[in-house]
Image (cartoon, grey):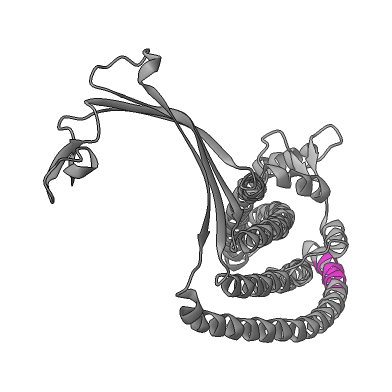
């Protein structure tokens, strides 16, 4: 067991040599563009850019070719006064008149142009806001990714430390157990002391397996943000991670998003008010129509010119009576958003002050726990020397060693809590 653990520890130390490929926290952050979630947000931004281009294209008249061919199975007939065609016709006489042929067709160019649409301005402004919101959502996703990736990175750093300490502790107790076995075989040790060392060795092995499992889980968690089998170790320690995180600005973007919602509400209110305005459209057609009982589209004599141009006016009369509730609703939404913005502003000021207070306390706590760990480490070394000289029992050393491990665990937890406070 001792030789096996020593080999594992040697491999870990070798993997951290200068020739191994490493990954720093700054290098990890540079991988954000490869994140699937961030790429999705970026595609949303691109989609909104194209939506703005669509709005610009709506200013251009729509021109398209129009052609059709129709076979009338029954020729339409309409009654007309016979006197219109025969002056001698009896009064009130009706003449059935065919007003089409068996074949007719139409071909030409159609133009449609919205000269004025009261909703166009509001729609464009809403699309601009949607573009701004998509950009903020992208920045928010980047910050969330960096936050979670940083915590995953830090978890591996701490889990590696825990695993290395568990290895060293297992090696130590393997040696202690061998000493007790030799003493017992030589008649200089008790069976109670040997059983105690064997039990403690098994506990150390369980802790070793547990720490290795935690390290594996942490490695898998980091794979959500960065996956490269060639990376052998993480080069940034907790001090570097904490310093880098303090120099980063993480924004929740809640205020900006609600502010955009408020601006959207204002735009929608103006759009509702503009709905009472009339709309103007221009339509034109230039082409020809074909009429004949025989299908011969190449015969120019059966084609007749057909063109027109018109301006349409549409007045939304009902909007004068139905928009009042929509206007009232938009005014209420404006008040809601204004109240939310004021609340977020106040809460952000309080949160920032609380965060600074928490960070200061976390740093003081970490400093104090580090001092406790140094003292516990010194005490462990002293007690180990005393135990190896045979002047104290193993149970007394176990208590000191447990205090040492607990002090070290407290330091790691304090480092992680400090990092988490900085990132929150």
Where residue 48 sits in the image (x, y, percent)?
64, 50
Foreground pick, 1 / 96: 96
Q: x and y percent of residue 148 in the render? A: 68, 58
Q: Would you place residue 52 above or below residue 332 in this image?
A: above
Q: Quadrant of the N terminus?
A: top right
Residue 153 picture location, percent across and down: 72, 53
**Is 310 left, or right, of 159 in this rendering?**
left
Q: Is residue 306 above or below residue 290?
A: below
Closer to the camera, 375 or 327?
327
Q: Residue at x 65, y 81 (%)?
A: 337
Q: Majority secondary structure of the magenta segment?
A: helix
Left or right: where 375 falls relative to 200 = right
Q: Position of residue 300 (x, y in %)?
A: 40, 15
What residue is drawn where x is 66% and y is 35%?
Answer: 229
Q: Say if 239 sits above or below 57 in the image.
A: below
Q: Is residue 387 magenta?
A: no
Q: Is residue 381 magenta?
A: yes
The answer to whether residue 33 of the structure is visible from this angle is yes
Give the quadrant of the C terminus: bottom right
Residue range of the region highlighted in magenta in the rendering:
373-383
Residue 179 or residue 100, whichever sits in front: 100
Residue occupying image coordinates x 39% and y 22%: 303
Q: Quadrant of residue 75?
A: top left
Q: Is residue 400 above or below residue 247?
A: below
Quarter of the rendering containing residue 392:
bottom right
Residue at image coords 78%, 86%: 350
């Amino acid at each position: 067991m001792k030789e096996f653990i020593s080999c594992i520890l040697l491999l870990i130390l070798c993997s951290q040599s200068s020739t191994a490929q490493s990954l720093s926290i700054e290098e990890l952050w540079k991988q954000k563009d490869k994140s699937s979630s961030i790429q999705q947000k970026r595609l949303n931004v691109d989609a909104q850019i194209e939506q703005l281009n669509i709005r610009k294209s709506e200013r251009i008249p729509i021109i398209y070719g129009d052609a059709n061919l129709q076979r009338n199975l029954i020729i339409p007939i309409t009654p007309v006064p016979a006197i219109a065609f025969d002056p001698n016709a009896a009064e009130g006489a009706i003449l059935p008149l065919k007003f089409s042929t068996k074949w007719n067709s139409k071909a030409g160019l159609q133009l449609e142009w919205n000269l004025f649409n009261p909703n166009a301005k509001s729609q464009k402004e809403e699309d601009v806001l949607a573009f701004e919101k998509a950009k903020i959502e992208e920045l928010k996703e980047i910050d969330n990714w960096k936050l979670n990736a940083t915590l995953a990175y830090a978890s591996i750093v701490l889990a590696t430390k825990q695993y290395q300490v568990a290895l060293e502790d297992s090696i130590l107790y393997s040696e202690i157990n061998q000493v007790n076995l030799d003493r017992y075989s030589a008649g200089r040790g008790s069976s109670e002391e040997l059983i105690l060392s064997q039990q403690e060795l098994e506990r150390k092995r369980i802790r070793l397996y547990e720490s290795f499992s935690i390290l594996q889980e942490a490695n898998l968690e980091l794979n959500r943000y960065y996956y490269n089998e060639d990376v052998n170790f993480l080069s940034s320690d907790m001090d570097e991670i904490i310093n880098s995180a303090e120099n980063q600005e993480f924004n929740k973007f809640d205020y900006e998003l609600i502010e955009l919602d408020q601006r959207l509400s204002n735009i929608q209110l103006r759009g509702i008010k503009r709905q009472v305005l009339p709309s103007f459209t221009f339509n034109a057609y230039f082409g020809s129509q074909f009429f004949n009982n025989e299908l011969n589209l190449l015969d120019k004599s059966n084609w007749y010119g057909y063109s027109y141009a018109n301006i349409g006016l549409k007045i939304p009369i009902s909007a004068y009576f139905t928009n009042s509730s929509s206007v009232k609703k938009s005014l209420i939404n404006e008040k809601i958003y204004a109240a939310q913005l004021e609340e977020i502003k106040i809460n952000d000021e309080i949160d920032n002050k609380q965060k600074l207070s928490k960070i200061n306390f976390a740093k003081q706590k970490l400093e104090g726990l580090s001092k406790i760990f140094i003292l516990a480490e010194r005490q462990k070394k002293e007690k180990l020397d005393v135990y190896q000289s045979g002047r104290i029992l193993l149970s007394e050393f176990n208590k000191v060693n447990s205090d040492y491990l607990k002090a070290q665990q407290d330091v790691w937890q304090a480092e992680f809590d400090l990092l988490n406070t900085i990132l929150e």
